[in-house]
Image: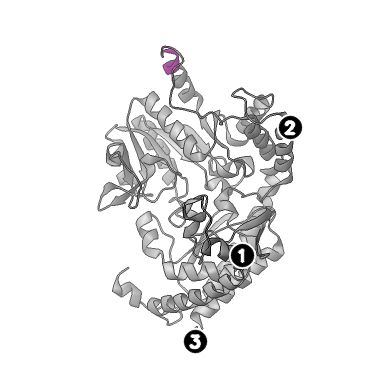
Amino acid sequence: MSPQEIARPLATDLTLSTLCSRARAMAEGEAGLYASRRPQSKAMFDNPEPGFYDQVPQYWMRDWPMPFPFAVAGASGSILTDIDGNELVDFCLGDTGAMFGHAPRPIVDALSRSAQRGLTTMLPSGEAAEVGKLLSDRFGPFVFQIATTASDANRFAIRVARAVTGRKKVLVFDGCYHGAVDETLVDFEDGRTVARKNLLGQAVDVTTTTVSIPFNDVAALEAALETHEIAVVLAEPVMTNCGMILPDDGYLQTLRALTRASGTLLHIDETHTISTGLGGYTAVHGLDPDIFVVGKPVGGGVPVAIWGMSRKVAQALSEIRAGMSGIGHSGIGTTLSGSTLQIACLRACLSEVMTAEAYATMSRHADRLEHGFTDAIRAAGLPWHISRVGARLEIVFSAKPVRNAEESRAAAIDDIQHALHIGLLNQGYLVTPFHNMVLVAPTTTDAQIEGLLDGFQTVLTRLVAQEEV
């Protein structure tokens, strides 16, 4: 951010540099309060036992904007309880993995039943046909396969796209999120595709496999597809990992038309935008992709993802496989994917958890949050706005909606994000780390919504108060 931008006055007559200074002071004080309430969690990290790297199952668990992670003792509905007895209302929800609340009863029952009859067999269970129909009814006339994570599903789908098109390259949008897929870990800088910074052990030159362009840029899309080198465009219908970037009116329709004209497949990844409504953004907005992927919440919190192909793509795949000699190994599928356990949880989630009624409740809560956040921002005189896709909302530190990753990165203010996160946390509300995302579940209550809005207003009031915090 330029010095001119840092010095610009806000509607409150505070400069951004003053606001950031206050945010840092606030976060420092909140960090002490956080630590004082969690002696047992603190002891875990002050006195580490041998075992996990950095004392956590995934090292990024240490990257939350808090002095140290709190250890979870239990999670139910929209409530997390840590080992020190602190209760938190969860608006992170495992960054969509628990979008329908923690431990939904139908999923718990499905786990119990499955545990008694076997968990994995490398063969289809008796529920497979019913689950296939449920998937088609919910997400559209695709031909489906099961994976364990959306990262895996995206990998497998890319392999199929390359096979049926005979092309090598993948196109993604700058700032995209598609899990841990190597081809997608790129950025767009100075007009060219580059490997993302901080990648560990990157051996392949990603510019030979991937093209990255800005979202909402029709000219860049046309230029990339005109080369006829692109096998598949892998897209989130709304960008969700660098703020929340909505598509321009007509952009996704143009994307579909241009991919068809160039013989390129369109692959829609709904891992986050499944929050839009029943069937995801694809169903709600009538998209028509060649490949469809959704993971995280589709099994109610159990590791499972689904990927679907259009019948045309599936037929092309069948023809390729028919010409292969022997059974071989296609590079698609993992042994634990498609397990009895996953099929049981998919059935329970699709029929009893991921329902129209659940989405209606989530939408009502999100309406209230959107209006309440907006009112608090206006009352504080801050040049921010709320971006939203269904039950997923983002607090964006800019006056206008951002249209691409470059604008989103310019709008990010780490100091304020940190203060907002830990300030809400100490009031009993957990939001998603690394950006200002809030997600509501059908288990979220009206009182919890109002509590979060009160907490948000309290943080903003402290930031813009006349006296230094």
Q: Which residue is mark 2?
A: 116
Q: Secondary structure at mark 2?
A: helix
Query: Residue at 39% of width from left, 51% of height from top?
Result: 175
Residue 323 in magenta? yes
- Where is residue 393? Give x, y as percent: 54, 58
Please name the residue shown 38% across and 49% down the image. 215
- SS assignment at label 1: helix
Specify the farthest residue to the bottom: 467
Q: Earlier in the sequence, mark 1 or mark 3?
A: 1
Q: What span is colored magenta in the figure? A: 319-325
Q: Position of residue 275 (x, y in %)?
A: 58, 49
Q: Quadrant of residue 281?
A: top right
Does the segment drawn in magenta span residue 370? no
Q: What crowding class fits label 1: few (fewer than 14 Cα within 10 Å), some (14-19), or many (20 or more)? A: some
Q: The residue tagged with tag 3: helix, strand or loop?
A: loop
Drawn side of residue 76 relative to residue 256, left or right: right
The residue identified by callout 1 is 40
In this image, 74 relative to 62: left or right? right
Exactly how many numbered labels are in the figure? 3
Task: Specify the label residue 466 is tagged with.
Answer: 3
How far apart marks 1 and 3 lie (CA) works out to: 37 Å
Any part of residue 439 in sight? yes
Q: Are marks 2 and 1 in contact (CB under 8 Å)?
A: no
C-alpha distance separating marks 2 and 1: 35 Å
Q: Position of residue 148 (x, y in %)?
A: 54, 36
